[in-house]
């Protein structure tokens, strides 16, 4: 004997439909729960705002010292005084200073006697090699004119040898060389304008010291008049070999 089922009495006939409805209901409840908001009453209670009360603000009264207005400008009134013309005024005549062809220029004649001519002596240095009368070194006064030049040079060399002192600083440092000295025998026989050129200032200072010890000389003469005479003298500083 076969058992027959009643389709209306079958329980799982609409189970998928019921599952879908239940799922939608649960989703709706979950969404509402997430969107539900709560507020703290202590944070939103701001009290009652009374808009009817007016706030009266006291405005301080400030006293501003305003300067007084400037006085009105003075009204200048011109007064014209009429003076009777009693005195006669002489007009000043201005003569013209322009010249014309009729004017004559006065001839001014200057005599030669009225012109004062002053002689200006030019101080010209005459080199030792071409001067007519060479300076005379003390001790060469009695030699002839032709021998005075050679006597001067010999006395000059003897003076350098006699007063020569090698600087100790130059000896310690091994400084040596040639110092060229140029000086002038002035019109009064004194030594001036000493100039030096050498390898070291120590040697140059020694050369200047030697020249400063020269005696006063008889000045050189050109055309019978004393003139300054430049003279050059080389001084060799040579260290002696040990």
Image (cartoon, grey):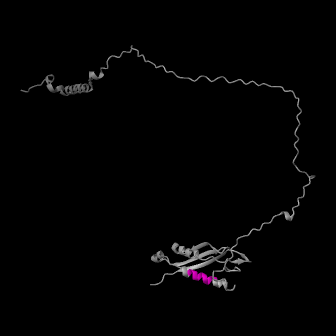
Q: Residue 8 lies in magenta, yes or no?
A: no
Tell me: residue 103, above or below residue 177: above
Between residue 196 and residue 64, name the one nearer to us: 196
Residue 140 position in % (x across, y down): 65, 83
Q: How many marks?
A: 0
* Residue 79 relative to residue 164: left or right: right
Toward the right, the furthest residue is 102
Above or below, 191 against 82 in this view is below
Quadrant containing the C terminus in the rendered view: bottom left
Instruction: Tell me if 162 is positioned left or right of 101 in this view.
Output: left
Front in this rendered view, residue 6 or 23 = 23
Magenta extent: 152-160
What secondary structure predominates along the stretch shown in magenta?
Answer: helix
Residue at 87%, 27% (x, y): give it. 84
Considering every residue shown, the one lying at the far left of the view is 1
Residue 151 lies in what quarter of the image? Answer: bottom right
* Residue 134 percent location from the top left of the image: 68, 80
Residue shown at 14%/25% (left/top)?
11
Q: Is residue 157 magenta?
A: yes
Quadrant of the rendered image containing residue 12 = top left
Q: Residue 105: x and y, percent?
A: 90, 55
Quadrant into which the N terminus falls: top left
């Amino acid at each position: 004997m076969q058992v027959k089922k009643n389709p209306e009495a079958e329980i799982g006939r609409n189970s998928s439909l019921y599952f879908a409805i239940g799922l939608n209901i649960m989703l709706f409840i979950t969404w509402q729960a997430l969107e539900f908001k709560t507020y703290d009453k202590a944070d939103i209670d701001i009290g009652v705002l009374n808009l009817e009360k007016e706030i009266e603000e006291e405005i301080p009264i400030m006293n501003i010292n305003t300067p007084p207005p400037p006085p009105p400008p003075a009204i200048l009134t011109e007064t014209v005084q009429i003076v009777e013309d009693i005195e006669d005024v002489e007009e000043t005549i201005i003569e013209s200073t322009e010249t014309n062809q009729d004017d004559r220029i006065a001839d001014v004649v200057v005599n030669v006697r009225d012109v004062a001519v002053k002689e200006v002596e030019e101080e010209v240095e005459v080199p030792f090699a071409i001067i007519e009368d060479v300076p005379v070194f003390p001790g060469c006064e009695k030699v002839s004119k032709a021998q005075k030049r050679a006597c001067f040079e010999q006395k000059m060399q003897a003076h350098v040898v006699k007063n020569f002192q090698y600087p100790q600083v130059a000896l310690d440092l091994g400084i040596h060389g040639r110092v060229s000295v140029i000086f002038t025998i002035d019109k009064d026989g004194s030594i001036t304008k000493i100039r030096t050129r050498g390898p070291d200032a120590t040697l140059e200072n020694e050369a200047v010291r030697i020249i400063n010890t020269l005696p006063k000389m008889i000045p050189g003469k050109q055309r019978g008049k004393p003139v300054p005479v430049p003279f050059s003298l080389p001084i060799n500083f040579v260290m002696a070999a040990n």
